[in-house]
Image (cartoon, rainbow, N blue to C red):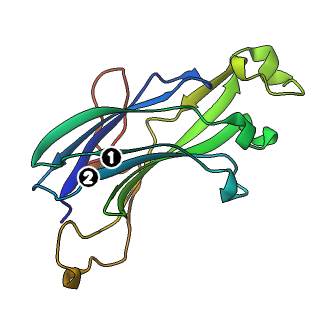
C-alpha cells in the first residue's frame, strides 16, 4: 500500500501563453509520517524523436512529510525554446509531472500539450520562424495519463516492492476523481 495518495492535480492558468510559467495545484494525503522529503518534478518533452530534448523545468523537495492532507501550488518556468528543435515547438507534445521518494518514482501524470498560434491566420499559414509571443499553450487537463509505481516507503530493504507499474486509463471513472469548478480537472484516486 502506498504511503502517499495524490488526490488531485489541477492545471492552473490554462490555456496560457507559451512563455508563461506552468502552474499546478497538487493535493495529496500522507497515511503515515515519512523520514524524507518528496521530490516533485516537471519534465517537458521537447521532441518525440529524441530524449536529449527533454527539459526538467523544475524539481522541488516538499517536506517534512507528516500524516495528513496537504495542498500546494507547483510552479515551473516554461521550456527554453532554444533547446527544442524548431519544427517541434508548434504542435502537440507531452508534459510529465512526477513524484519520487528516496529516488523512487511512485507516480507519473502525463498530459498532452498543444502549442498553437492564437491568430487563425498564423495557424493556417505558419511563419517561417516561430513567433513565441503569439504562441498559446493548451494542456489537455481533462485527459491525464496516470501511472503508479509500487515502491518502498521507509520499509526494510528486505521488503522490496515488486518492480511493476500500474497504469490508469484516463477514461476509467473508478480510477479518476473529477474536481468540481471551472479552474481545472483531472486527477486520480485509487
Q: Earlier in the sequence, mark 2 or mark 1?
A: 2
Q: According to the image, label 1 marks what residue?
A: 61
- Within the image, what quadrant is residue 169 found in? bottom left
Question: Mark 2: which secondary structure?
Answer: loop
Residue 37's tag is 2
Q: Is residue 32 left or right of residue 128?
A: left
Q: Which mark is residue 9?
A: none
**Element at label 1:** strand
Residue 159 falls left or right of residue 130:
left
Q: CA distance from mark 2 to mark 1?
A: 6 Å
Front position in the image: 124 or 7:
7
Where residue 90 appears, as percent x and y from the top left, is 73, 34
Choose top left, top right, bottom left or bottom right for residue 44: top right
Residue at figure coordinates x 73%, y 57% from the top left: 49
Q: Give left or right: position of 30 versus 149.
A: left
The residue at 46%/41% (across/down) is: 143
Residue at 87%, 23% in the rendered image: 127
Amino acid at each position: 500500500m502506498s504511503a502517499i495518495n495524490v488526490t488531485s492535480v489541477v492545471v492552473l492558468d490554462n490555456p496560457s501563453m507559451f512563455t508563461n510559467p506552468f502552474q499546478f495545484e497538487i493535493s495529496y494525503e500522507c497515511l503515515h509520517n515519512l523520514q524524507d522529503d518528496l521530490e516533485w518534478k516537471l519534465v517537458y518533452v521537447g521532441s518525440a524523436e529524441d530524449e536529449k530534448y527533454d527539459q526538467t523545468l523544475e524539481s522541488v523537495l516538499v517536506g517534512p512529510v507528516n500524516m495528513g492532507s496537504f495542498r500546494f501550488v507547483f510552479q515551473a518556468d516554461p521550456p527554453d525554446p532554444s533547446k527544442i528543435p524548431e519544427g517541434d515547438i508548434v504542435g502537440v507534445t507531452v508534459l510529465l509531472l512526477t513524484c519520487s521518494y528516496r529516488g523512487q518514482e511512485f507516480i507519473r501524470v502525463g498530459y498532452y500539450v498543444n502549442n498553437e498560434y492564437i491568430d487563425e491566420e498564423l495557424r493556417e499559414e505558419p511563419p517561417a520562424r516561430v513567433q513565441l509571443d503569439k504562441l498559446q499553450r493548451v494542456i489537455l487537463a481533462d485527459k491525464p495519463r496516470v501511472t503508479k509505481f509500487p515502491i518502498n516507503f521507509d520499509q526494510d530493504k528486505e521488503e522490496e516492492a515488486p518492480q511493476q507499474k500500474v497504469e490508469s486509463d484516463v477514461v476509467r471513472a473508478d480510477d479518476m476523481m473529477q474536481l468540481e469548478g471551472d479552474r481545472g480537472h483531472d486527477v486520480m484516486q485509487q
